[in-house]
Amino acid sequence: MRIGTFKLKHHLNYMIIAVITIVFGIISLSGGHLDSSLLFLFEKIAISIILAVSLSLVVGFLGELSLGHAGFMCVGAYISGKVASLLASSLGNGILTFIISLVVGGCVAAVCGAIIGIPALRLRGDYLAIVTLAFGEIVKSIFQNTSSESFGGAIGLSTPRYDKKYLFVFAFIIVIITLIVVQNFIRSKHGRAVTAIRDNEIAARATGINITKYKLVAFILSATFAGIAGVLYSYSNYVVQSAKFGYNYSIEILVMVVLGGMGSINGSIIAATLITFLNTKLATILTGDLAVLQNLLYAVILIIIVVYNNAPALKNFRNQYNWSKLFRKLFKSKSDPADIKDDTAKWDVVPTKIEMNEILSIDIKTQEIKDYSENGGNQ
């Protein structure tokens, strides 16, 4: 569907998220009863979407493997948590403190992305993955070994918890901002340069694309939103512990991107939502001795999804039964091809300076033809 230059399919994802935010926001702000576990789940889903979409920019569109996304989130969570703790005593735990923490957390993560990206992006494939993985582990170790007065050490940093009635609304607003920024970047000339690098770096360099520049821009933008997700995490929890931002969490974010489809923003959103919901429900259902089955069931479900998405034997089934075909069948216009509608480009509709009848009925006099022939066609 296209309205002028506005393509609905390009904006449908954050329009849906905006509707969900408005509906549940009105219910929460008007005093309606929403379970605290549901509000906490909304916060976790928003954080996961931001992480998945931002990592998709590097892994899906740039084509580079990064395993240090949790490290950028860790930096944003700790630095913003410390800033919020210091500002809460003077400014209070309000919207101003929240905005300042967002800016600080995102900027610090962006600086870390630039510092790591400048040397690391000269590498490719497994080597880049190892460097980013090392960055994440180094960041985690640094905060884990700090003093209790600075960042809490192994116990963790105590941070002010934002009101649950409002935080999920702010979180989804940031999700919408993330989608707007990332999608407009991808559809711009800069985004086309990034995807050209992914498709063929040698050909992109030959056409004059600054490889280092665009790799660094995508990496910094991805790190910035990871830091912002860390800010939301610090406000969503009373304590920020470095153990949360380990290697396994980076892999979990990567799984969201891969399951959603490489280079698919909507797929990353859906995968992040499903995986977060799945993890939360398994942690609730499997308690006590059954808690050891959580990772096992989680892994089995992921294997089933991966096999379904990639098995050659299921290709025909996937092509016949998929969401895009179902969507087209539901919203396909049921017009009869035999019914010819008015054509706005017909000659009797398009305004012209000369009537078509005048063009087709020009009289050529015999004397004019004779004079033209005598002059040798040079009249």
Image (cartoon, rainbow, N blue to C red):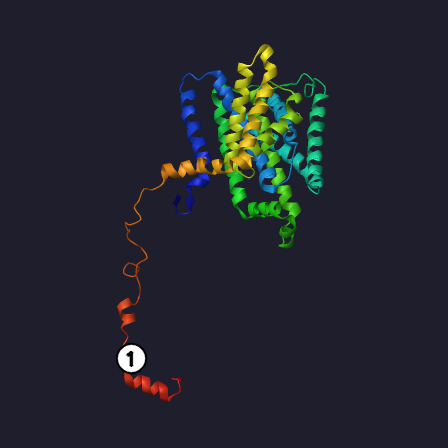
Q: Quadrant of the C terminus?
A: bottom left
Q: What residue do we see at 31% from left, 64% from top?
A: 352
Q: Position of residue 44 (x, y in %)?
A: 54, 24
Of residue 219 and residue 25, the one placed in the foreground of this image is: 219
Of the residues shown, which amino acid type is indicated by label 1?
A: Ile
Q: Residues within 10 Å of mark 1 (few under 14, many from 20)?
A: few
Element carrying mark 1? loop
Measuring from the top left, give residue 27's x and y in whole percent: 40, 21
**In the image, 17: left or right of 74?**
left
> Residue 273, relative to residue 370: is it above or below?
above
Number of numbered discs on residues: 1
- Tell me: residue 184, above or below residue 351: above
Decide if residue 96 is in sight here: no
Tag 1 residue: 364
Residue drawn at x 50%, y 35% as measured from the top left: 266
Q: Nearer the viewer, residue 42 or 345?
A: 345
Question: Whole-percent x and y of residue 350?
Answer: 31, 59
Q: Nearer the viewer, residue 196 or 340?
A: 340
Q: Residue at x 61, y 23 (%)?
A: 81
Give me the residue at 40% from left, 39% from top.
328
Quarter placement of the N terminus: top left
Q: Is residue 369 at least partly visible in the picture?
A: yes
